[in-house]
Amino acid sequence: MLIQNALASVAVKDLAASAKWYEVLFGRPPSRPMTDLAEWRFEHGGWLQVYQLPERAGAGSFTLSVTNLDEQIARLDAMQMNTQQRTSSPTVRTVMVTDPDGNHIAFAEALDASVEH
């Protein structure tokens, strides 16, 4: 079996409210392949699906790869998000934020081409 891509999903309490929040975060509306799902597809592969399941909301975590972490942090700061949780190594820099339900979102910039994909 050859896996060619990955799909992340995150549970939220209120799909309509969360879809609006993620729309602001990503700067574009989701596709809606099903009525109970909001989905974003990314340019270089992968998807994020947001779905309503209150009992699991806030327990999720996913990482989004970015090309310029400083620009992403500026966008997050403009959204008045807490961007203080940052890490750095010789190969990657990250900032961790949370969505309104408490799900953890890491934005990561590869500094070493061997970890970009």
Image (cartoon, rainbow, N blue to C red):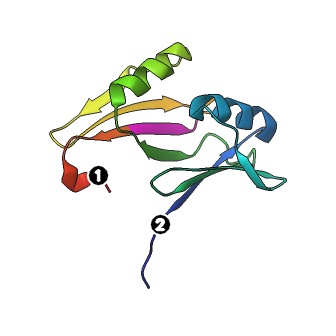
The residue lying toward the viewer, choosing from 84 and 64, is 64
Disc 2 target residue? 5
Kind of element beneath mark 1: loop
Disc 1 target residue? 116
Residue 112 shows up from this direction: yes
Mark number displayed over residue 10:
none
- Type of the residue with mark 2: Asn
Kind of element beneath mark 2: loop
Task: Please report the residue visible at 80 percent of the width from the left and 37 percent of the height from the top.
Answer: 16
Q: Is residue 56 magenta?
A: no
Residue 49 in the image: state x and y as whole percent. Answer: 64, 52
- Quadrant where the image shows the C terminus: bottom left
Residue farthest right in this picture: 35
48 to the left or right of 44: right
- Type of the residue with mark 1: Glu
- Residue 6 vertical placement versus 21 (above, below): below
Residue 35 in the image: state x and y as whole percent. Answer: 84, 53
